[in-house]
Amino acid sequence: MAASSSQPETMKAECSLDNPKACYSETSDPALHVTLLGGEWSSSAGGLSTINRELAIHLSDHSAVKVSLLVPKGACSYEEKNEAHTYGITIVEAKERAAFDRLDWLSFPPHEHLMEIVVGHGVKLGRQVQVIRDSPQFSNCKWAQVVHTAPEDLSRYKCYTDPISKGETKHESEVELCKLADLVVPVGPRLKEAYSSYLQRCKTDQDVLSITLGLFQREFEDLVAKQHPNEDGEFKVLLFGRGDDEDFELKGYNIAAQAFTDQRLKNKPYHLIFVGAPDRKQEEVREKLLQRGIAEAQLTVRKFIQSREKLKDFLCEADLAIMPSKSEGFGLVALEALSAGLPILVGSRSGFAKTMETVPYGLSCIVNSDDPTEWAKAIEAVRLRHRMRLKEIKALKASYGEMYSWKEQCEELVKRMWKMVNVSSFRLSGESQTYNCARLVKV
């Protein structure tokens, strides 16, 4: 039932999206229950898991939000559940369903689970919401859909059969899920532009809220002091991602290897460390990179890392991180390197590069070419000014943190969620905000 219009004026003044608890009667639950769909707590599956975990952690910082992560049964260890609990996050398990894909167990949350917002992510972790909302107990649940890729853009550079048609199919699936969702959350400015265009006929600006990922301060802040100038010794260039055959051209691994054939780098004290080969396929990936002309002595290949602690080791070992992707929805690896205070170079057709255009010193990190020669020039330039580039990356990191903070963006996301489920009307007056809030109380 709605809050009575005869409330004291003091209650009306206190009721706001910044203070949602004041909007409810004593019979109301003042917290907003948000559930993210996930495959794991750790990052063994790559970037999607990392984004989900960080989003959950920063949403849980909001005092009026209770966050849970719904995962397949057995996906999280006892230690991982405890770690999540330290952030106020509850790990909820979906039980096994015979003959179902493991991630599709998420289509059937425990009946007693309370959630008002369910957060999906792409096709892998978004398709299940359609089934969830068909259940009577979750029929009123609102759906926020996160997207961090544009499949049609990526398909141009995929190395498998019929990439364009497969990319179109994936694109259609992503867009259809977004049409069904109550709120679409693109990651970064490049995807905001893309999905606003895709959804122009059926969504308004209020239905699309872009977030630009903040720095990974919690994990990498302490690494900054460990970066030291290197203008004389062997200069280590870090290239990391997934070394799958289909992504070899898309991620620009060939560009990186060919850059080392340029006279500026070849047989000189530069070394490429590629981290991302499938386990037990290091030799195969190494051979593929050597075929691009890089000298054997200048190449090290390591397997894909599932440990965040190991990632810290690599970020401390390297002098420069590069992301020569020909297309990238955002570019998580570059953000991780920036968070550690490591100089970075990124391809211009990435969401991260588009973000860098707005940040002081950001343009110096962008390479506007797929030409290996231009990448060789850029790598050499970083080395020749490595001491100065370390100072610049420190300033860049500080500016980025101010412009794109997790706190501010999650506050905006929480406000939008409250509005979806709780607020019947609100009024903005100048710089102050006054709200007349009403929430239906289940009886």
Image: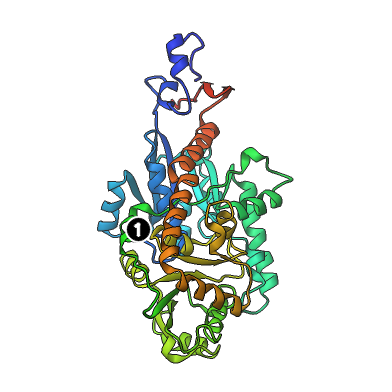
Residue found at the far right of this picture = 201
- Is residue 185 left or right of 36 when viewed as pictured? right
Task: Tell which of 6 and 405 is nearer to you.
Answer: 405
Task: Tell which of 63 and 229 is nearer to you.
Answer: 229
Is residue 243 visible in the rendered image? The answer is: yes
According to the picture, the residue beneath numbered tag 1 turns out to be 220
Q: Position of residue 266 (x, y in %)?
A: 50, 87
- Is residue 343 left or right of 347 when viewed as pictured? left
* Residue appearing at x 65%, y 61% in the figure: 171
Task: Tell which of 253 and 208 is nearer to you.
Answer: 253
If the image is split into quadrants, where does the C terminus sit? top left
Task: Tell which of 238 and 180 is nearer to you.
Answer: 238
* Residue appearing at x 51%, y 86% in the figure: 289
Above or below, 346 against 401 in this view is below
- Is residue 56 left or right of 76 when viewed as pictured? right
Q: Position of residue 77 (x, y in %)?
A: 28, 60
* Residue appearing at x 41%, y 43% in the figure: 59
Number of numbered callouts drawn = 1
Is residue 98 visible in the rendered image? The answer is: no
- Answer few, some or many: residues within 10 Å of disc 1's Cα (few below 14, many 20 plus, some between 14 and 19): many
Above or below, 17 against 402 in this view is above
Q: Position of residue 381 (x, y in %)?
A: 51, 72
* Residue appearing at x 34%, y 59% in the figure: 224
Q: What SS does tag 1 mark?
A: helix
Under mark 1, the amino acid is Phe
Q: Position of residue 42 (x, y in %)?
A: 36, 60
